[in-house]
Amino acid sequence: MALTRRQTLLAALAGPLAGCAGPRPTRLIGAATRDGRPHIVCAELQGGVRWATPLSFRAHETLPWGDRLAVLARRPGTELVVLQQADGEPLARARTEPGRHLYGHGLWTPDGSHLLTVENDYERGRGVVVVRDATLRPVAEYASGGIGPHQLAWLTPGKTVIIANGGLLTHPEQPRKKLNRDDFVSSLVVLDVTDGSLLSTLEGPVAQASMRHLTVLDDGRVWVGYQYEGRLPRTVPLVALFEPRSNTLDHPEADALTWTRMQHYVASVAAVPGGHVALATCPRGHCVTVWDLEQMQHLRTHSIRDTAGVDWDVRGQAFALTSGRGLAGRLPLPELLQGDAPVKPHLSVYRGWQWDNHVTVI
């Protein structure tokens, strides 16, 4: 009997999965709010908060390295802080230079000596990548090659990064208004952080779609999520696979119902390293979409209310998920791929907490 595509994927992943006797304890780090006050939270994936540090700003992505944890403000915030990973105690604080604000994302250098932050130079209408030392003092900066740089990741660790320039122009005096919504250019840029040279630029092929979130696969390809800003209703692709070597972008196949259900918004993306399976979370559509990156097609959609944060848990061989409803849990890979019945994620309730768009497994 011929194997189905899902059976083939499971067989390819059977080696690493067979080596796991069962889920091992996993901790999550993420931004969350409680009683309207922003925090950084360290929690057990199986339930329970280890520590929670109040913040004076709303954070977005959390960036662990060694025993440290960098936390950056969402747009249009200007604050960033480094905490001790063990207990959440602050180690260093900083603000952006005048005329700048953060986008909530950043990146440690491989040796942990410097932190890269993406920022809006709003008086000049351009994005920048700022290189900061261990005390968070700026030591260099480079143009991001576009407007609204959002998430970035290493292509060649220590040398080149891939940046998703969302293209949307904003200003702190109008924090939630997109000033060029009807006419903007989103792009993927490869930047050499050793000298600031732009090695390649690819403009987004979908009009009024802002490329914002990404993750790099083991083979160097980049899984990208969009946020559509055009007139509604309209069916547009919201995820893509970028190939840096050829500077090309391909959209996987999916039916119109899948794109419509995603509600024009991808909050986070994640992938199995080398496993050809990727996720995109869509909190507005209350769903998680699963994609086959080898065949470049949609596999399944799972209904989970207000789910946004996602990260791959290599020890548990599962995706870790968080939601704005105070839930966190695991989606084991076999359950994502097998059968057509709705998946039942292993969820824990963190009463009183509302998780933000991103979560990191540590």
Image (tube, rainbow, N blue to C red):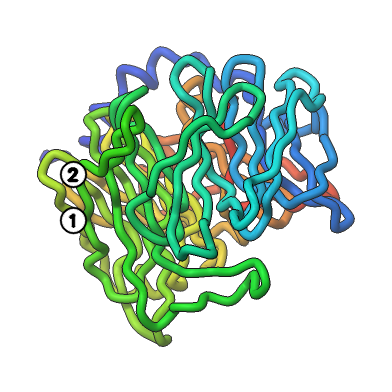
- Please tell me which residue is depicted at 29% across the width and 52% down the height of the picture: 188
- Please tell me which residue is depicted at 59% across the width and 54% down the height of the picture: 100
What is the quadrant of residue 105 in the picture? top right
Q: Nearer the viewer, residue 8 or 309?
A: 309
Residue 250, numbered circle? 1
Which part of the image, by quadrant, shows the N terminus?
top left
Residues at badges 2 and 1 in contact (C-beta under 8 Å)?
yes
The relative height of residue 68 versus residue 260 in the rendered view (above or below) is above
Q: Nearer the viewer, residue 28 or 60?
A: 60
Residue extending farthest right = 35
**Percent position of residue 182, x then y:** 39, 83
Amino acid on which disc 2 is placed: Glu
The residue pinned by badge 2 equals 243
The relative height of residue 168 versus residue 292 in the rendered view (above or below) is below
**Percent position of residue 256, x then y:** 29, 75
User: Can you see residue 321?
Assistant: yes
**Percent position of residue 239, x then y:** 32, 58
